[in-house]
Image: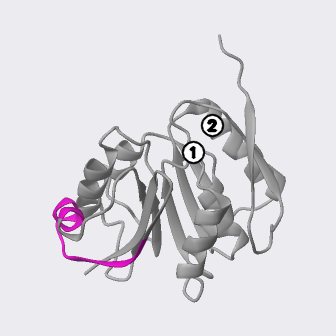
Amino acid sequence: MTPIINNSFQIVSGEYQGRKFNFPKTPSLRPTSGKIRETLFNWIQFESHNKTYLDLFTGSGSLSFEALSRGARQVVSIEQNFNVYQSLKKNKTLLKTNRISIFNQDALNFLSKKSTQTFDFIFLDPPFNKNYLPKTLKAFSKGNFMTSNTKIYIESEFKILKNEAAEWLSTNIQINKQKHTGQVHYCLITPL
């Protein structure tokens, strides 16, 4: 068995600025870089405080913990890998917060049940090259996770095209912001 090698990320800004978190190295785990997180939270800085977040495919937790640091009211984090889930729970304990709920569950299974709450922001950073993005966006249209004001942040290995994303979500969308850094394309969209 290959030993688990710990990696880490650092919170960019907010209440926990500079705090480092460890996570196990696992295949297909790509933590969102500090530079990309800084860009994302610059995009949403005037509307992100005291909001609700859903982080599907949580992985290292870099997006979830950054949202907490920047004043999220509540974060729901979904992670299928049990070792990574255990690491997320350990990091939650270090923060002594009840503003994050972490579930060891497959993201598509989570989305298959009707949600009892809608979210202001949804983080969608699935493993690359596994076709999760279309399936996940299609699942949103059935589950009551969004309102007309919800913003969806997406990271992918390809540029998000408006018509394609609208088809997957079964609704018109607006691409608010879009960039790429290296191999990672990222954007912020709003369903219309």
Percent coordinates x, y for residue 45 in the rendering: 60, 83
| Residue 153 visible in rendering | no
Which region of the structure is painted magenta? Answer: 164-178
Give the class, few, some or many, for how many residues have Cα within 10 Å of label 1's Cα (few <14, many ≥20). many
Q: Which mark is residue 110?
A: none
Q: Amino acid at mark 1?
A: Gly
Percent coordinates x, y for residue 129 in the rendering: 35, 39
| Residue 61 visible in rendering | yes
- Between discs 1 and 2, the one toward the N terminus: 1
Q: Which residue is mark 2?
A: 84
Residue reaching furthest front? 182
Q: Which residue is mark 1?
A: 59
Between 163 and 182, the one nearer to me in the picture: 182
Q: CA distance from mark 1 to mark 2?
A: 7 Å
Residue at (63% x, 74% y) in the render: 72
Q: Which type of secondary structure does the marked residue at label 2 adopt?
A: helix
Between 157 and 140, the one nearer to me in the picture: 157
Above or below residue 25? Residue 162 is below
Check residue 172 for magenta coloring: yes
Quadrant of residue 13 in the image? Answer: bottom right
Residue at (50% x, 35% y) in the render: 28
Position of residue 110 in the picture relative to residue 144 (left or right): right
